[in-house]
């Protein structure tokens, strides 16, 4: 049996059932940001305390946009360092490692923003190992801020645990925030900040005691450490920063008006969008349309095998037109197959015609936003032909942006098509927050400040420039240009900007404001070294990789060759290079190497297809627990859902949530059908909930007839037919006449209770029952427990051996969770949190036998004697 010890973003695995054999005694993550360029060093140490050798795996999660630059292992005084090589050069070593059964894998995708690097090594008895990984990335400005994301995961407290960040921004820092998803309010003061005008130091160093999980085994350190900040922008041309013969120019001028837009929303309503996807799309579209400004123009096109237009022309975004559009969107029904080619070409023709007929403002931005979840399978189905058709039709006159739902969509097809047409694509991950993802993307691209931006520098003074032409500058974003300096004299360094703005063409030439790092931070010279040069190399590689998918074959070959040369020169692990780590010999004398490859989004998807199934692994800082029906429990995580059913006798009371720290408790009582059917299906439901928050002095009793609220010494009784809103400093309660009760308890939790009425017309019978839905629980303490509460801090699981089940529409699989191996089934479960009347279907992994193996203990362990037992 293989047990695990997780350190930070690292996992240690031992071939032993005794977890005491390996001690992880240190973890240090240090991030230094120099003008948005982040250099992160992750180091951890482990000791094999056993009298025999142990295999230990170092595992780390890093941002997908980052490049690994160095990895090393120090074992018994000897250092084993990684070496970056061209993929073809490393191929023989890779194949040898695979043939020996080594875990010679990829830097794998891990969720939406992260990817995973891991390496295993055999450690002799009573020996130590120190792992060190370095990666670098350029922080992108989105929606007016930069974000540093560090994933941290431990299962046991660590003697030396440190997270450090030093941020140097010579333009000046306007704000900085630091938080962690695994910290509740009482532990937030552990994050220490020291901030001056141009520097910030952030540290997080909890003691062993502070890392412990109150009332449970393990530790609270499991989630994301997040730093957000922005810089001052006082000059139109931004700042040019110079170090060691390289410069970087950050361009994001303040106080620009937004350019009006003419947008065509192209919405896939094919059969695969049926259910949750179409509902989430409708909800997002309502937000998009409501956000339009009155000087914007818009149109909506729906498609499956047919193309349907809301109106024959673009419509001005008046209040009346927006209202009509929302009514149209809410009536979208899923149809049949998918004809992407016809739908996008119809949108192009519509925008062209409106522009030719001068029905839209001359100074405005034409764009198409395509939302789809599948492959074209009607009309033109060859993706390369569709790309050519769209590129030819658009002819550089508008921008195309694509949102691709889920893992089945051909993301590479959408990505290339968008980049051919002045836009970009984004994958939307299936889950409860799809609407948030859609809105986030729309918010990024819906507010253009400048179009067709050219930044020009003196030819004699610069060389090897990164991209200097950008199709758009969006509100809250930033353009970054880097290059080599051919001369040291920067006194007469002129920058020219040519662009299209909301009020006309812009052409300005101005002497640049040049900032010399060695003058501004003389005491820190040793930190920065060649950061502008490495930033230039990073940007150049990223932009060459983008070019490698478009243009002529010769252009593609040249881009790949140049990107490979720079990757090797600067020791970056990119999609063109591999890191080879030569490991110590094993006990049988076998020589082995570990190969780390970085994949593009398209390569990742192709690899998953060859494996046949993407094995999901869920680990979340917060799970949303809910129970409804007869009674079905659902644990909704960011990318997956788990469910189980518990049946018991009417009158049994179960503890659903118990947080001893705050005194928040939820208990629920089972009821049976009103009419007992001999030898029939006598389902049970939850019919009463008792909710207590001792610290806030709040107590609620909810049953199928009424709601009793006790707070501040006052008691209020409500009927389900009422429409009520109660609010004071600690409690907010909202009851609507569709039998939906939502409650927010200050700095604690937010939940919803829904009353259902199930009707059997042929039996002239009906049944009232309740559903409980957690909406936000991240303020509760790490020791929270109960049938639902134990999952509020997430759960880690792995699913393997997926195969068709006995029912044709279901899949069976094996799940490893909490040290158990369970048989699970993939099926649909009703969720009423967004639509209390009809509900929506969500996919979940169903664990049989009352959740045995998934829940701690058995269901009977959660029974209590009274509705208000705390």
Image (cartoon, rainbow, N blue to C red):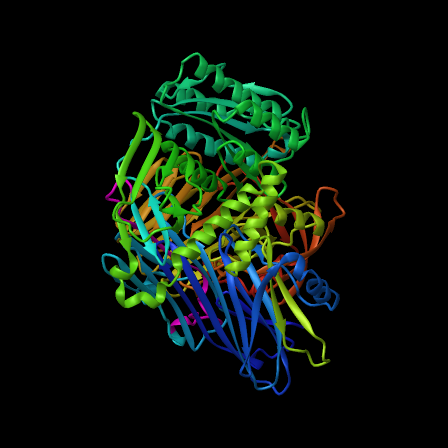
Task: Report the front residue among 284 and 772.
Answer: 284
Across and down, in percent, residue 307 comes to 59, 20
On screen, residue 601 versus residue 165, left or right, reads right
Q: How many marks do you count on the picture? A: 0
Q: Is residue 79 above or below residue 230?
A: below
Which residue is found at the position 54% from the left and 28% from the top? Answer: 267
Q: Is residue 738 above or below residue 576?
A: above
Q: Is residue 566 above or below residue 425?
A: below
Snapshot quadrant of residue 82: bottom right
Across and down, in percent, residue 320 comes to 37, 18
Which residue is found at the position 32% from the left and 66% from the top? Answer: 525
Q: Is residue 729 magenta?
A: no
Residue 301, can we see it?
yes
Across and down, in percent, residue 572 comes to 52, 58
Task: Report the front residue among 842 and 610.
Answer: 610
Quarter of the picture containing the N terminus is bottom right
The stretch in magenta equals 210-237
Q: Is residue 227 magenta?
A: yes
Residue 651, can we see it?
no
Quarter of the picture containing the C terminus is bottom left
Task: Report the front residue among 765 and 158.
Answer: 158
Across and down, in percent, residue 504 comes to 31, 24
Task: Report the front residue among 590 and 634.
Answer: 590
On screen, residue 453 versus residue 712, left or right, reads right
Most extreme residue toward the right, as rendered? 806
């Amino acid at each position: 049996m293989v047990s695990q010890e997780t350190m930070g973003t690292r996992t240690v695995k031992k071939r032993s059932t005794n977890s005491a054999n390996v001690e992880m005694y240190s973890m240090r993550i240090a991030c230094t940001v120099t003008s948005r360029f982040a250099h992160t060093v992750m180091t951890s140490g482990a000791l094999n305390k056993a009298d025999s050798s142990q295999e230990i795996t170092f595992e780390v999660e890093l941002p997908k946009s980052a490049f690994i630059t160095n990895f090393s292992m120090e074992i018994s005084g000897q250092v084993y360092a990684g070496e970056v090589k061209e993929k073809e050069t490393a191929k023989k070593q890779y194949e040898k490692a695979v043939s020996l059964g080594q875990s010679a894998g990829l830097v794998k995708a891990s969720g939406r923003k992260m990817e995973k690097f891991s390496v295993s090594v055999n450690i002799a008895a009573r020996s130590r190992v120190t792992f060190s990984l370095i990666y670098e990335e350029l922080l992108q400005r989105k929606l007016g801020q930069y974000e540093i994301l560090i994933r941290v995961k431990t299962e046991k407290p660590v003697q030396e645990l440190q997270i450090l960040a030093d941020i140097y921004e010579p333009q000046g820092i306007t704000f900085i925030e630091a938080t962690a998803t695994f910290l509740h309010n009482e532990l937030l003061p552990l994050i220490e900040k020291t901030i001056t005008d141009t520097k910030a130091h952030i540290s997080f160093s909890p003691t062993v005691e502070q890392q412990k999980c109150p009332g449970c085994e393990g530790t609270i350190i499991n989630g994301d450490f997040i730093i957000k900040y922005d810089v001052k922008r006082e000059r139109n041309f931004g700042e040019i920063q110079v170090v060691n013969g390289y410069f970087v120019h950050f361009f994001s001028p303040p106080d620009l008006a937004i350019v009006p837009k003419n947008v065509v929303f192209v919405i896939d309503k094919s059969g695969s969008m049926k259910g949750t996807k179409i509902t989430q799309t409708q909800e997002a579209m309502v937000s998009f349309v409501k956000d339009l400004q009155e000087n914007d123009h818009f149109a909506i096109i729906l498609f499956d095998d047919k193309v349907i237009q809301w109106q024959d022309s673009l419509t001005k975004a008046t209040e009346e037109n927006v209202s009509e559009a929302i009514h149209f969107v809410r009536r979208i029904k899923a149809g049949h197959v998918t004809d992407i080619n016809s739908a996008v070409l119809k949108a192009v023709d519509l925008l062209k015609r409106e522009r030719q007929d001068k029905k839209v403002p001359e100074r405005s931005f034409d764009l198409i936003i395509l939302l789809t979840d599948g492959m074209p399978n009607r009309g033109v189905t060859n993706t390369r032909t569709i790309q050519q058709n769209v590129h030819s039709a658009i002819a550089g006159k508008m921008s195309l942006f694509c949102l691709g739902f889920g893992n089945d969509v051909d993301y590479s097809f959408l990505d290339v098509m968008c980049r051919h047409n002045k836009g970009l694509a984004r994958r939307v991950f299936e889950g409860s927050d799809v609407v948030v993802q859609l809105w986030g993307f729309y918010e990024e691209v819906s507010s253009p400040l400048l179009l067709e931006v050219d930044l020009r520098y003196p030819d004699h003074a610069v060389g090897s420039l990164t991209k200097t032409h950008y199709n758009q500058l969006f509100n809250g974003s930033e353009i970054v240009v880097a290059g080599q300096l051919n001369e040291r004299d920067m006194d007469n360094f002129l920058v020219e900007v040519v662009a299209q703005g909301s009020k006309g063409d812009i052409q300005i030439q101005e002497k640049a404001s040049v900032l010399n790092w060695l003058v501004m931070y003389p005491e820190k010279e040793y930190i920065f070294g060649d950061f502008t040069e490495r930033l230039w190399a990073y940007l150049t590689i990223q932009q060459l990789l983008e070019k490698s998918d478009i243009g002529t074959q010769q252009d593609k070959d040249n881009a790949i060759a140049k990107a490979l040369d720079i990757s090797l020169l600067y020791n970056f692990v990119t999609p063109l290079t591999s890191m080879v780590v030569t490991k110590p010999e094993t006990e049988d004398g076998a020589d082995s190497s570990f190969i780390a490859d970085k994949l593009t989004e398209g390569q990742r998807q192709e690899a998953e297809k060859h494996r046949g199934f993407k094995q999901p692994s869920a680990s979340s800082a917060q799970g949303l627990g809910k129970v409804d029906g007869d009674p079905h429990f659902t644990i909704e995580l960011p990318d997956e859902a788990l469910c189980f059913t518990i049946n018991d006798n009417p009158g049994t009371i179960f503890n659903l949530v118990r947080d001893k720290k705050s005194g928040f408790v939820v208990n629920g009582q089972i009821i049976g059908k009103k009419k007992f059917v001999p030898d029939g299906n006598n389902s049970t439901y939850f019919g009463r909930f008792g909710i207590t928050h001792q610290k806030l002095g709040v107590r609620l009793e909810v049953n199928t007839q009424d709601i009793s609220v006790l707070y501040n010494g006052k008691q209020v009784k409500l009927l389900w037919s009422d429409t009520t809103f109660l609010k004071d400093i600690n409690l907010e309660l909202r009851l609507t006449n569709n039998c939906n009760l939502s409650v927010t308890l200050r700095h604690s939790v937010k939940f919803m209770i829904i009353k259902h009425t199930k009707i059997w017309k042929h039996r002239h019978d009906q049944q009232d029952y309740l559903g409980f839905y957690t909406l936000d629980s991240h303020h509760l303490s790490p020791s929270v427990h109960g049938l639902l509460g134990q999952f509020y801090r997430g759960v880690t699981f792995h699913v393997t051996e997926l195969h068709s089940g006995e029912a044709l529409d279901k899949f069976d699989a094996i799940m490893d969770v909490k040290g158990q191996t369970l048989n699970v089934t993939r099926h649909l479960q009703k969720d009423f949190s967004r639509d209390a009347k009809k509900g929506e279907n969500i996919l979940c992994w169903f664990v049989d036998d009352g959740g045995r193996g998934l829940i701690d203990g058995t269901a009977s362990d959660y029974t209590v004697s009274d509705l208000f037992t705390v």
